[in-house]
């Protein structure tokens, strides 16, 4: 048979499949209505496992067994989504909270003179990101990232700036771990181009340097440059700006810091090397967090934190919902769950307008199906 005849066969099969799919969805809705009337959960994992086993046994071909399971996992995911849409007529507490935040921030933007928490000292990259987001910020500096979270959570600062990932060194894992311990909402994010400079006291030559200080992320981002230096010790410190300040205040002349050009002028240092990062296209993404959800016009990114059941298919179940609702997944990050063995917390960045009803539907479904669900905010990203 030629290709047209084969496609005609597929079309005839589809003409049977679609009505059967619609019939199945109708019956599954009646099942959900029965469960709602009798106060039963929509999700029945025992029933789903039994169904997957039964349908996969209808063929002896191992490959087709796998594809059959995948097909029915998708069907069941679509069925649950349809059930939630039809049954969840009342808004959830989260949905009400988000709609209120959207209404409260309508036609507004970030205030330009807020009190903002940053980690490090003057000249830190977080303070540079802060200056991009706020015209006249009152910046309070904290020794570590936990201090930034705490300052926002306790109301000492209205906002906080935190690095979340770098295009060269990857995710800032310490920040992701702290996200699991604090209450906050992301209200904006920004991508800041990072150009590292090797700074030393005036008159010092590169051949004189015996020790270099910087933050571990900056050290990773400049690894190729550092490997070319022989007999030079590399020491990690809490911040690139703190490294520059340490060099400026030290009596030693054989030390240098990997920091920013801003810190060169700020601390009276000279550049021994400019743009020493491995990648000239080096960006760090920072998030701006607040104590309450603030959703400003145009928000098209949403971040979530989920803990899933430790079982096969748990992550696929979540991903299938994104696919079913045509929601684009921008990032997926996993970190070990504190106090648990072989369990992970998953962080999702998704692309969807905050005004999309599909987004609200997905949030409602995930709240019910996940062991732990945290909405981290909807926002725009400044580039």
Image (cartoon, helix red, strand yellow):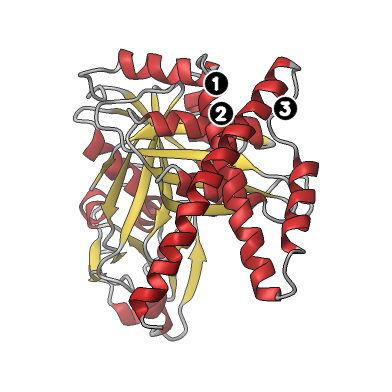
The residue sitting at 75% across, 37% down in the picture is 44
156, 358: nearer the viewer: 358
Give the residue pinned by disc 2: 84
**Is 155 left, or right, of 351 in this rendering?**
right
Name above or below for residue 56 compared with residue 368. Answer: below
Is residue 171 in view? Answer: yes
- Secondary structure category for the residue under label 3: loop
Residue at mark 3 to residue at mark 2: CA–CA distance: 11 Å
Q: x, y percentage for residue 10?
A: 44, 66
Examine the image and state in which quarter residue 295 appears: top left
- Secondary structure category for the residue under label 2: helix
Q: Do the residues labelled 3 and 2 touch (CB within 8 Å)?
A: no
Q: x, y percentage for residue 269?
A: 25, 59
- Secondary structure category for the residue under label 1: loop
Neighbour tally class for label 1: few under 14, some 14-19, many 20 plus, Cα within 10 Å: few
Q: Do the residues labelled 1 and 2 touch (CB within 8 Å)?
A: yes
Is residue 214 in view? Answer: no
Q: x, y percentage for residue 28?
A: 63, 34
Give the residue pinned by disc 1: 88
Q: Do the residues labelled 3 and 1 touch (CB within 8 Å)?
A: no
Neighbour tally class for label 2: few under 14, some 14-19, many 20 plus, Cα within 10 Å: some
Q: Along the polypeptide, which appears first: circle 3 or circle 2?
A: 3
Q: What is the tally of numbered marks visible in this picture?
A: 3
Q: Residue 41 carries which label?
A: 3
Neighbour tally class for label 3: few under 14, some 14-19, many 20 plus, Cα within 10 Å: few
Residue at mark 1 to residue at mark 2: CA–CA distance: 5 Å
Name above or below for residue 286 compared with residue 247. Answer: above
Examine the image and state in which quarter residue 286 appears: top left
């Amino acid at each position: 048979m030629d290709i047209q005849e084969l496609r005609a066969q597929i079309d005839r099969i589809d003409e049977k499949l679609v009505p059967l799919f619609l019939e199945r969805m109708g019956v599954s809705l009646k099942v959900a209505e029965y469960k709602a009337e009798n106060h039963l959960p929509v999700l029945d994992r025992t029933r789903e496992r039994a169904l997957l086993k039964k349908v996969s046994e209808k063929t002896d071909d191992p490959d087709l067994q796998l594809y059959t399971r995948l097909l029915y996992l998708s069907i069941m995911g679509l069925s649950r989504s349809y059930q939630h849409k039809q049954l969840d007529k009342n808004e959830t507490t989260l949905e009400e909270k988000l709609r209120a935040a959207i209404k409260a921030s309508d036609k507004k933007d970030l205030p330009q003179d807020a009190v903002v928490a940053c980690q490090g000292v003057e000249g830190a990259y977080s303070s540079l990101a802060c200056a991009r987001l706020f015209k006249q910020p009152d910046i309070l500096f904290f020794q570590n990232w936990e201090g930034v979270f705490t300052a926002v959570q306790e109301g000492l600062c209205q906002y906080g700036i935190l690095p979340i990932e770098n295009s060269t060194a990857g995710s800032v894992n310490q920040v992701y771990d702290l996200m699991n311990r604090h209450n906050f909402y992301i209200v904006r994010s920004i991508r800041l181009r990072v150009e590292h400079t090797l700074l030393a006291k005036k008159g010092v030559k590169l051949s004189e340097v015996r020790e270099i200080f910087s933050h571990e992320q900056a050290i990773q981002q400049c690894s190729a440059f550092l490997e070319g230096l022989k007999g030079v010790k590399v020491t990690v410190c809490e911040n690139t700006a703190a490294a520059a300040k340490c060099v400026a205040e030290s009596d030693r002349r054989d030390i240098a810091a990997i920091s920013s050009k801003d810190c060169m002028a700020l601390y009276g240092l000279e550049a021994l090397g400019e743009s020493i990062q491995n990648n000239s296209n080096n960006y760090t993404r920072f998030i701006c967090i607040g104590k309450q959800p603030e959703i400003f016009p145009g928000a098209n990114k949403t971040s979530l934190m989920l803990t899933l059941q430790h079982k096969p298919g748990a992550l696929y179940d979540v991903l299938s919902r994104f696919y079913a609702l045509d929601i684009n997944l921008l990032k997926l990050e996993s970190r070990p769950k504190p106090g648990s063995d072989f369990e992970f917390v998953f962080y999702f960045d998704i692309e969807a307008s905050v005004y999309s009803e599909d987004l609200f539907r997905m949030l409602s479904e995930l709240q019910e199906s996940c062991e732990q669900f945290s909405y981290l905010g909807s926002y725009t990203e400044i580039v």
